[in-house]
Amino acid sequence: MSVFFHIILVVGNILISLLATIYVPGLVSDIDPLSARILGGAVFLFLLQLHILLFVVRVNKEDVTDRLMALHQDYQVYQDQLEQTREETEKLREQVKNNELGQNKEIVNEMKLLQTLLAQVVEKSSGGSSVTSKNETSLEVRHGGDREADEILNIMHHALEDNRIDLYLQPIVSLPARKVEHYEAYSRVRDDKGEVIFPSQYIRLAEDSGLVSTLDNLLLFRCIQVIRRLGTRRPNMRFFCNISSVSLNDKDFFPQFVDFMLDNHELADRLVFEFTQQDVQRQANNIWASLATLGKRGFRFSVDNVQTLNHDLSDLAARYFKYVKLNPELLLDENIDIERTDIKEAYSRYDIELIVEKIESDATLVEVLDCGIDRGQGYLFGEPVLSSDVTSKL
C-alpha cells in the first residue's frame, strides 16, 4: 500500500467518526452530546485498529509471498547447480573410465612387450650353448678365450631371466649454463653379486648370440616406465634410446617396435631414437619407410657415433632427424673442410640440433663453446647413473 492510500483511509476513518458523533444523537434520543463524542472516538479507534489489522495482514502476506518467491528462486538455483553437478560428475566418470581404459591398454601393451622379452630370453637361453659353439673361434679372438665369453654369456642370460638389467641415464645439458635438458638411456647388466658388466664387455657377444634385440627392447621398456612415472613434469625433456643395427634387421623385434610406438604415439614428445651414422647410411629403404611412419606421428631421431661430417643434411631432415651428436675430436679437427663456427649454423638451417658428446674436461668445454655449441654431454656434466636416482629428483 502507498502512503497516499493510508492517508485516505485515515481521513475516511475521521469522517466516519465525525458523522457518528453528529448524527447518532439525532437518531437515538437517550444519547447526550458527550456520549456521542465518546461513541465517535470509539468508532475512530475501531476503524483505526481495523486499518492496522488489514495493513499487518497485507504486509505479512507480501512478506510470505516474497519469502516463497525467494525460496522458489533458491530452489531453482539449487536445481540448476544439481544438474550442473550431475553433468560434471557424468563427465568425470566418463573421463575416469577413458583414463582407466587408456591405462589398461598401456599396461596390456607393456605386459605383452614384457611377455615377448621373457619368451625371447627363454628361447635364446635354451639355444645359448649352440650359439656359443657356432661363434667359438671369433669369440675366442675377441675376448681372449672361450671361457671368458661363456662366463659373460651366462651372466647375461641369468641377468635377463632374473631382472638384473638396469636402466642408467646420462644428462644432456644446455651450454654454458649446464642445465639438464634431456637424458640418454643405457643398459647395465648386473651379475649375481651385484657387480656391473659394462657394454664394452658384452655388446659383441650380445650381437653374436642374438640377445642385443632383447636388450634394446628391454631398454625401451624401462625408459617408457620412467616416462610414465614422470607424467606431465618436465614436458620438454626427452630420452634418447639407441636402437642397434641388429634390432633394425630383426624380423621379430622391428615390426613389434614400430607397431608398439604407433599405438603409443603420445610418447613422441618424450622419446628420441638414436642410430649410428653407419646404420643411417647403410640401412635398406624398407627400414626407413617403416621409421618414416613413426616420424609422421611426431617421433624424432638422432645420429651418434659420427665418423665424418659428410652428411646430406636435407636428407637427414627429410627422414625426421632432429639431433646429431659429434665427439670433440671431430668437431675440433684442424683438417675439417668447414669453419668450426659455421658447423652449428649449417645444421641449424635444417632445424637439426648439434650435441657434442664425450666432453670430459674444462679445456675441451672451452673449445666447444668457442664453436657456439649449446648442447653437451659427457662425464664433465655427469656420468650415467641409475634411473631411480634421477627420477626421484625430477
Image (spheres, rainbow, N blue to C red):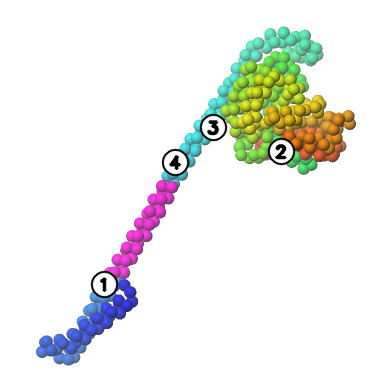
Question: Closer to the N terminus: mark 4 or mark 1?
Answer: 1
Q: Residue furthest bottom?
A: 33
Q: Quote the CA–CA distance across marks 3 and 1.
A: 71 Å
* Residue at figure coordinates x 76%, y 20% from the top left: 201
* Residue at figure coordinates x 44%, y 41% from the top left: 90
**In terms of depth relative to the viewer, which is nearer, 251 or 147?**
251
Examine the rendered structure and indicate whether residue 210 appears above or below residue 302: above
Residue that label 4 marks = 90
Q: Is residue 222 left or right of residue 93?
A: right
Residue that label 3 marks = 103
Q: Quote the CA–CA distance across marks 4 and 1.
A: 53 Å
Q: Callout 4: few (<14), some (14-19), or many (20+) C-alpha neighbours within 10 Å?
A: few
Indicate the secondary structure of the residue bearing disc 3: helix
For badge 2, the amino acid type reads Glu
Residue that label 1 marks = 54
| Magenta span: chief secondary structure | helix
First to last magenta residue range: 57-84
For badge 4, the amino acid type reads Glu
Q: Quadrant of the N terminus?
A: bottom left
Indicate the secondary structure of the residue bearing disc 1: helix
* Residue at figure coordinates x 18%, y 88% from the top left: 22
